[in-house]
Amino acid sequence: MVAYAGVVADDVFKALADPTRRTILDELTEKSGQTLFEICSRLSMKHQLGISRQGVSQHLAVLEAAGLVETRREGRYKFHDLNTAPLRQIAERWHVPHASGPQESTP
Amino acid sequence: MVAYAGVVADDVFKALADPTRRTILDELTEKSGQTLFEICSRLSMKHQLGISRQGVSQHLAVLEAAGLVETRREGRYKFHDLNTAPLRQIAERWHVPHASGPQESTP
DNA sequence: TTGATAGGCAAGTGAATGGTTGCCTATGCT
DNA sequence: AGCATAGGCAACCATTCACTTGCCTATCAA
């Protein structure tokens, strides 16, 4: 049950626990390969998140430690890419039927 | 993007953030409809988790608030059942290909 | 070389969280 | 009735965590 290259499940779930980090993943889903400043701008503009650059940087570090974000440096720029591979274990672990499967009805 | 009957995404991710709670979900996956005491026993026996009954009870409350666990009372017993429905949004939100999809290789 | 841009490191702070202990209610058995 | 079992509630404590401020390094352009 190896999760993802030395990254344990705990890191992934801890990373997903914060709403700001989930929003960052949303932004990277929409546009891959953004820099730190670009992500800061989008969080501020689109999501009204008043958070410092360092705050965002720390969130990105957590996401990277969890294997959910990968980075590549080019000159003075560091680009961030989304990697959803670690998320797959969630569905597998608890036998989650994927979309269009049996739907629950809770009125 | 309604998640699950009034339960917001935040509750689900927060619930999954704790390793003990994930173990509880594991146990309920293996055997559905356990009582609080049964879950306590299993955590102690199978997982060497030295945690008080109240501790487990609080975890179950968090899982229930997240919609991941449903309960039914019968006499003095309260049975706990797993509900994976809230987990489906995770795969959908970040377009996670399900198992047997394209696999990542990271050496 | 000077200045501006992109990012990193480290310490400090307040709030949230997991866990405990102590006591209380409800159901069932004899 | 009396006792044991199953569970609930509330206050308290220690740790973790998100976020900030302040300063430092590296790359590029004038």
Image (tube, coloured by chain):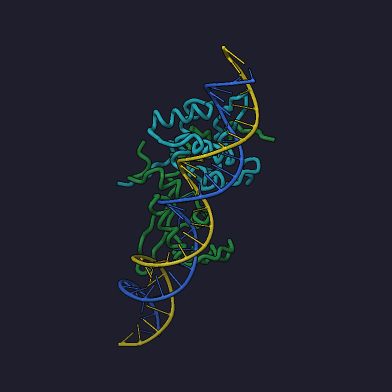
Chain colours: A cyan, B green, C blue, D yellow
Q: Is residue B107 left or right of residue A9?
A: right
- Rendered view: A52 above or below B36: above
- Inspect this view and state whether residue A88 appears: no
Question: Where residue B10 appears, x then y in whole percent?
Answer: 41, 44
**How many marks are shown on the rendered structure?**
0
Residue A48 seen anywhere in this rendered image of the structure? yes
From the top left corner, tell me how far across and down residue D5 is, in percent: 43, 74
Foreground pick, A24 / B69: A24
Q: Nearer the viewer, residue A10 or C15?
A: C15
Front position in the image: D18 or A105: D18
Query: Residue lying farthest right?
Result: B107
Residue drawn at x 65%, y 43% is: A6
Q: Quadrant of the C terminus of chain B?
A: top right
Q: Residue at x 45, y 28 (%)?
A: A41
The quadrant of the rendering that contains the N terminus of chain B is: top left
Q: Residue at x 43, y 58 (%)?
A: B60
Residue D12 placement, left or right of A70: left
Q: Position of residue A32 (x, y in %)?
A: 52, 26
Which residue is depicted at the point 66% across and 33% down? B105
B86 shown above or below B19: above
